Amino acid sequence: MVFAKESKFLKQVEEIISSHICLKIPEPVDFFVAIPTLADESVFEIIESLRIANIPDGKRVSVVVLVNDSENTPEQMKEINNKILERFEKSGYCKGISICGNLSIYVRSLRNIPQNIAGVGFVRRVLMDEAICVFTRELKKTKSQSAIEFLKEKFIFSLDSDCTVSPDYFERALEFLEKTKADFGIFLFEHRLSEDPKAKIAGILWELFLRYWRDSLKVAGYPFAYYPIGSLFVFRGYLYPIIGRISLRKAGEDFYFLQKVLHSFQVIDIPAFVFPKAEPSSRTPFGTGYEILQYISGNESRLKYVWNYRSFKIIEQVIKGNEPEEFIKFLNSEPKYKLQIENIRQHSGQNFKRNFVKWFNPFKVLKFLRFLESIYPKSPIDSEIQKLINDINQQNLLDLSLADEFFSTKENENFEVRILKFLNILRTFDMKISFLL
């Protein structure tokens, strides 16, 4: 049985290696840091941030930056890529530079990628495939009897080029993944807000929306309430061949990758920080840059209105095993889902609730939330977040000794001041629950 499992795993690894684009990153590596970048000169900030981060004793880190563009990338952006590569070339990073003996930085490029596959999903796949290739080459030089066990002790860190990290980034990841024996970790995050006044408010609102969505699910008892943000991921190397390569999607690849992970592996929050930039961008069809661009272009309602908090209270009832009227209507509108639940009920016996929650994955939760919009219309973000914070307070999930200050908003209170108050509460809440192992 053990041999069969190992044999299947080696076959999965070989499928990756046989079709991957080799970046020629040398081994040995314990922490492989994957950073895709497209016309983003802030990539030098993440390099400096990682350079000064503390590295656990004996661990060897390879930071791999992959500069990329497609055949349809505007010439102006390609020229920025050229300047980035020239600067890296002068620094020696294109050949690989070892810093302090245990951190090395490598810069590679993929240019004029065919449009049908170009995008962040493709570039992340190339980088993660390379990590498996590097780990496997090292494995072949060791006396390890198990590829699975060997790759369990190797880690892939996924970042974006517009991020920086806290000094304990590597240390906390190893500490908490080892302590819990978890396979996948998601770092805390705080956006670095724009100096432009309108873009700053958009950045606050976008981060508030993300936290409102995740934390409302968390308070509702949803077990898969994690941030599906690719720049926050860290995971054991053996996980990647088992669940399959990351999607080639131009955006949203991280959402679907995490959803596959949640079905089979333990996921935890890591109490160290990634600091993404919150600036307008047109590089991807949705996400931080896109939402901020929409807001400053006049489409403010996208961020000022969010799902009604009553929708999350309905989800809470569903998770508890009840079938409120709204959920029955949802199933009637989705015959395929209704049939799936009937099959689960028929074959699960006493395990129905566990199997149902596994079926009720983040994608289906998202679809249900969108369905509920027709029953409970979207509402102003500050009023709905106040309801969430009330629940957090009433359930004693966070010490809100200054609650009155936060709940007593004055009519003439500056909107930015009010939403920053709420953001700080939810940031504190996320920090607290990240320590609850």
Image: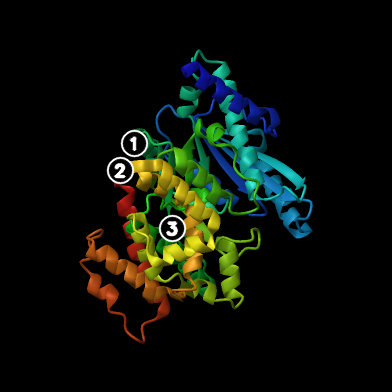
Residue 112 x/y as whole percent: 78, 47
Residue 401 x/y as whole percent: 20, 66
Q: Is residue 394 above or below residue 224?
A: below
On screen, residue 235 versus residue 7, left or right, reads left
Say which of 75 and 288 sits in front. Answer: 288
> What is the quadrant of residue 92 in the picture?
top right
Q: Is residue 26 visible?
A: yes
> What is the quadrant of residue 428 in the picture?
bottom left
Badge 2 amino acid: Leu
Badge 3 amino acid: Glu
Badge 1 amino acid: Thr
Q: Is residue 208 above or below residue 244?
A: below
Badge 2 vs badge 1, beta-carbon distance below 8 Å: yes
Q: First in sequence, mark 3 or 2: give its number.
A: 3
Disc 3: which residue: 190
Q: First in sequence, mark 2 or 1: give its number.
A: 1
Residue depicted at 58% across the width and 33% down the height: 131
Q: Is residue 157 above or below residue 81?
A: above
Q: Is residue 352 above or below residue 189?
A: above
